[in-house]
């Protein structure tokens, strides 16, 4: 039985992959991760992808949504699921 009731967030394709000299390093921490989620949505809206991405904790969770192109996914996760036991 599937208990997940949120709508599916479809991934988007990126228009631009930055050159090999660029990288994105993401910090951990719940509040910082939530702030960063908006920055990733802006990158996705602009169609920009980094060739190298590293992250820990909340940064890694944000990276997953970013790599998959699921704009708005991190916001749904924080608003709907972070406070649940």
Image (cartoon, rainbow, N blue to C red):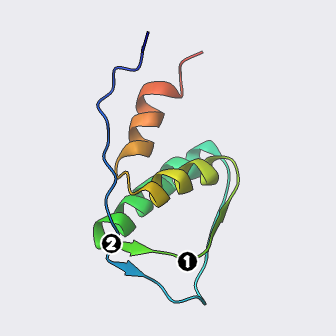
Which residue position holds label 2? 47
**Where is residue 32 drawn, in percent x and y?**
58, 52
Which residue position holds label 1? 51
**Labelled disc at residue 5:** none
Quarter of the image containing the C terminus?
top right
**Where is residue 81 drawn, in percent x and y?**
49, 26
**Where is residue 71 drawn, in percent x and y?**
34, 52
Total number of numbered labels? Answer: 2
Please tell me which residue is depicted at 50% across the width and 47% down the height of the picture: 34
Among all residues in the image, which is located at the extreme top?
A: 1
Please tell me which residue is depicted at 61% across the width and 43% down the height of the picture: 30
Quarter of the image containing the N terminus?
top left
**Where is residue 4 drawn, in percent x and y?**
40, 20
For numbered disc 1, what is the local secondary structure? loop
Residue 9, by quadrant, is top left
Q: Nearer the viewer, residue 3 or 41?
A: 3
Please tell me which residue is depicted at 51% across the width and 75% down the height of the picture: 50
């Amino acid at each position: 039985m599937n208990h997940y009731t949120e709508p599916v967030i479809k991934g988007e394709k990126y228009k631009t992959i930055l050159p090999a000299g660029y990288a994105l390093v993401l910090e951990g921490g719940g509040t910082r991760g939530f702030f960063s989620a908006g920055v990733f949505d802006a990158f996705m809206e602009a169609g920009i992808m980094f060739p190298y991405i590293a992250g820990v904790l909340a940064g890694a969770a944000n990276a997953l949504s970013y790599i998959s192109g699921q704009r708005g996914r991190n916001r749904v996760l924080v608003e709907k699921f972070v406070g649940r036991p």
